[in-house]
Amino acid sequence: MFLLRQISEDFFRPAARPTPGRLLKSVRSSSRAIAVFAVLAAVAGGCSTSEGPELAVVIGQVTLDGTPVTNGIVRFLPDRDAGTSGPIASAVLDENGKYELLSPGNRSGAVVGSHLVTVICNDLGVREVSEGVFEDTGEKCLVPGKYATETTSGLRATVEEGPNTIDFKLQSE
């Protein structure tokens, strides 16, 4: 926008209508400015972390008194007190109590580092059987409420680089 305004102002200024040489010089200097801007934008874009922090794949199983928890969500919250920062990762438990964590943007995995973990019951008694398709499980929440918050769950996990298998064996109250 600036380039067009500069050229048009120079060209249509009544007192100093540019000569072809002056107009060409104006275009050249503006082209140089655009080239510098393009290089800076490319460099800044190359340094971007729009994809987010490094993630590692995390799979596992959640059981309660030895029985798979089939009606809930597991969440990994980065433990800031331990120096881990990044997005929360979560997963819906399947019919075998198994999970695979996803981070925002449908990225597979969780941030490498220490995490506080919660297991939240799906009180609705529904399960996603395919993308956007849910079925009634007829199940009620069996997981004790203490596992629902990071301050009371007592669940912790360390996600390391590479694939991770992290199981949680919950106990009834």
Image (spheres, grey):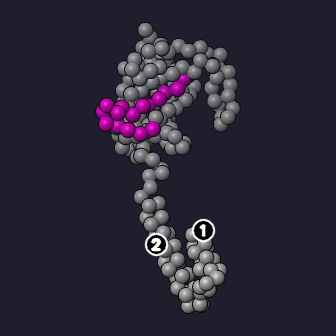
Residue drawn at x 57%, y 75% is 6
Label count reads 2
For numbered disc 2, what is the local secondary structure? helix
User: Residue 1 shows which numbered tag?
Assistant: 1
Foreground mark, 1 or 2, reads 1
User: Residue extending furthest left?
Assistant: 82
User: Residue extending furthest front?
Assistant: 15
Residue 16 is drawn in which quadrant? bottom right
Residue drawn at x 44%, y 66% is 40
Q: Is residue 28 above or below residue 55?
A: below
- Read off the residue under disc 2: 36
- Is 80 in the magenta? yes
Residue 4 at x, y = what percent?
61, 73
Residue 158 at x, y = what percent?
34, 33
Q: Nearer the viewer, residue 38 or 141?
A: 38
Q: Which residues are magenta?
A: 70-87
Mark toward the start of the polypeptide (1 vs 2): 1
Give the amino acid at mark 1: Met
